[in-house]
Amino acid sequence: MIKFFRKIRQKLLSENKFSKYLIYAIGEIILVVIGILIALQINNWNEDRKETKREKLFLKELKTSIDKDLLNYDENYDWRLKMKKSGLDSLLHYIKYDHNIHDTLFIKFYNMMSMDIRLKHDRGPYEALKSSGLDYIRNDSLRTAINRTYTSLPQLQFFSHSYDTQSNPKISELEYQISNIKTFNHKGDKIFAEYEVKIDEIITDQNFLWIYDMQSRKYNRYITRLEQMKSALNELKVQIEEELKK
């Protein structure tokens, strides 16, 4: 009987030891799994931090590009358009009220009216972002806004330049009808021509009036397209600044 109880005791001790080993093994497995999960989480955190840093870099470069474009519009485009408008307004006064204008004054206003601009914008940062993948911008609405803005800008430029392409040859042709080259002058290494009006009633001449009409149309297109470009870039700039604050 004593031997029987000893065998049962040994069996229970053996089973208890096995249970301890089993619990220990399960604990080890759980620790390994937790370690793997922590490592994955740290890796994901690092990757997320890298992507966030890369995203902010793209956005900062875009914002810098937009600031340069807007500054360029203010410093180089606005004053030319103001000069063009001043020339148009001055000549319109003579067209409507006083047909007598001195040739020198006419040429001054005519040159002001003839100022053109070539709308453009910096596409470098956007092209870099597009080649890397627009998905770097994780904010869906901002990504859509960036793509929409930089898709629309070339279209606005085209609408402005297309009229220049159509009207400039005609303007040049008509200019031959209303002016002569008076003389050539030197300014440093450059040679430029001075013109004189060859029509007495120039302000009512039909060829001049056609030129005036085309220059007026060009001005209106410049103003409209430039304001649309400024508005689009300013709106995008605000969205980028809001995203950078997060």
Image (cartoon, rainbow, N blue to C red):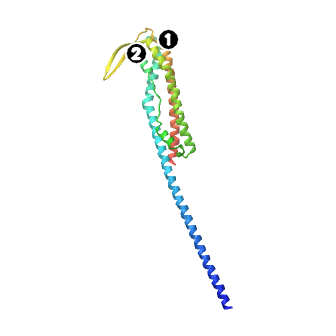
Q: Is residue 33 left or right of residue 73?
A: right
What is the x, y in percent for residue 184?
34, 16
Dot 1 lies on which element? Answer: helix
Q: Is residue 12 above or below residue 205?
A: below
The dot on residue 206 is 1
> Residue flagged by tag 1: what amino acid is it?
Gln
> What residue did someone put label 2 on?
105
Q: Nearer the viewer, mark 1 or mark 2?
A: 1
Which label's residue is closer to the chain start, 1 or 2? 2
What is the x, y in percent for residue 197?
41, 11
What is the x, y in percent for residue 180?
40, 12
**Label 1 crowding class (10 Å Cα cut-off): few <14, some 14-19, many 20+?**
few
Q: Is residue 93 above or below residue 19?
A: above
Q: Is residue 114 above or below residue 231?
A: above
> Residue flagged by tag 2: what amino acid is it?
Leu
The dot on residue 63 is none
